[in-house]
Amino acid sequence: MSVAVWAAVRRRPSAFLWSRWPLRAWAFLLTGTVQGVVSLLVLATLLFLGVGLSVVGIGLLVLAGVAVLGVPLAALERRRLLLVEPVRLPDPHGSLPGAGAAAWLRTRLRERATWRELAYLLLHAVLFTASGLGFVALLGLSLMLLATPLIVWAISPDTVMLIPGQRISEPLAALPGTAAGAVGLLLSAYAGCLLAGAQVWTAQSLLAVRDEDLGSRVVELTRSRARLVDAFEAERRRIERDLHDGAQQQLLALSMTLGLAELELRGQHPGAAELVTRARGEAGQALEQLRTLVRGIHPQVLTDHGLPAAVAEVALRNPVPVTVDIDLPHRLPGPVETAAYFTVTEALANAAKHSGADEVAVAASLQGGKLVLLVTDNGRGGADPAAGAGLQGLADRVAILRGRLIVTSPVGGPTQLRVEVPCSG
């Protein structure tokens, strides 16, 4: 699992202090502390009521409510993680349109994700809240010490004591307190990174989708290498046939017709003949461009500059806003880059045509020698990979590289394509 805030510190430890990451980590921890205190109060109240009322039967229903209390908290937590993570974790629960409260409760109690979310609720309410309160105390004390000269000036002629028995009556004498506050802020930056990353890692472990959660909603599309080769060869033959019998013949016929028109007009209407000559040249250029396109169905920017630049170019042309976060230390093997690129283009095309999404996120990184590519949209979900050949073709393209493509698309969204491809032989 990749934790963005930890990766930011490892990449440039000194530049981390002047980036937005400390503020993002602080916002994440402060909001989490408030959320944790509220969660702890609600959890304690419901447990007290459930145990107290269990003798009359109503308490059992309250305790069942405690069991699913992690579901709404997890939904809120997945949104809050966007403060420090580029891609939102998909919801492992399927939507239940039209289901009553009793059916919803029965379904959720049977799902393993519900119990993992309850475990996260307990960790968040106790452990993360306690660590968050400690961090808030450190940050608050550091800010107060940093502002000591201003405080001394504001309350003058009264005095301030940072150390018992040692009074400070003028702002200059409070400068050591300012230095201590600056050191405290430095510690808060790195401590906030450490604590925020720990919470993110825990959330990714407990709140992310697992294979056992997906059931029929997850389709892992893997095919044999032989079928992949056959599919690519059939595609190549189809393109050649279509070009020879269709577009190429039409362009040739157009060029011949323009040539005849040029001969007819040359002596009688020189101006019109010149226009026809120009049109004939443009038709020839179009024919040559078409032939070039078929000879290499491969974006030039991918060849010249690699996957991040190629995906960024596709994202700019996409009608749905796309956020791109591709962090690769070096160029990947050509087949891996090609498979990842066509996965992104197919996913973006599907999101624009069918999902109703208004935001798409593309993220890629190297994890354990594998390229892990995630394409997530916030559309209506319910995508069926078996309904079309697009995703199956992508799975074939990935299969020849000993990789896999997993599609997660519960009804109600979000839809996520995850591609894992080894980058070494």
Image: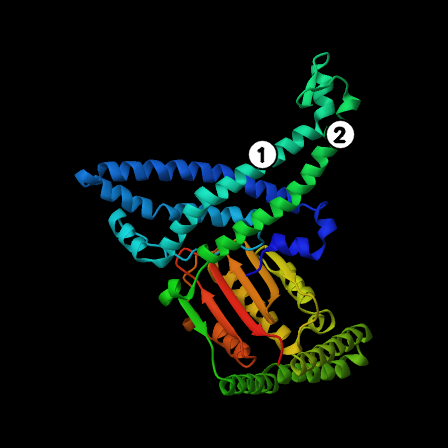
Q: How crowded is mark 1: few (under 14 residues within 10 Å), some or many (20 or more)?
A: few
Q: In which quarter of the image is the N terminus?
A: bottom right
Task: Out of 283 and 163, give the one closest to the viewer.
Answer: 163
**Observer-nearest residue: 356 or 376?**
376
Q: In which quarter of the image is residue 397?
A: bottom right
Amino acid at circle 1: Ala
Note whether residue 357 is visible.
no
Helix, strand or loop for disc 2: helix
Q: Is residue 62 left or right of residue 32?
A: left
Q: What residue type is labelled 2?
A: Pro
Q: Where is residue 311 in the image (x, y as percent from the top left)?
A: 64, 65
242 left or right of 257 in image: left
Look at mark 2 in the image and give the residue it sits on: 176
Q: Quadrant of residue 332?
A: bottom right
Q: Position of residue 122 (x, y in %)?
A: 41, 46
Q: Nearer the viewer, mark 2 or mark 1?
A: 2
Judge whether 156 appears above or below 232 on screen.
above
Q: Residue lying furthest left in this view? A: 56
Which one is earlier in the sequence, the residue at label 2 or at label 1?
A: 1
Give the residue at x 54% y 68%. Answer: 346
At a point 61% along the width and 55% down the height, the residue shown is 4
Question: Which residue lies under the disc numbered 1?
Answer: 137
SS category of the residue bearing label 1: helix
Work out which quarter of the rendered image holds the C terminus and state it: bottom right
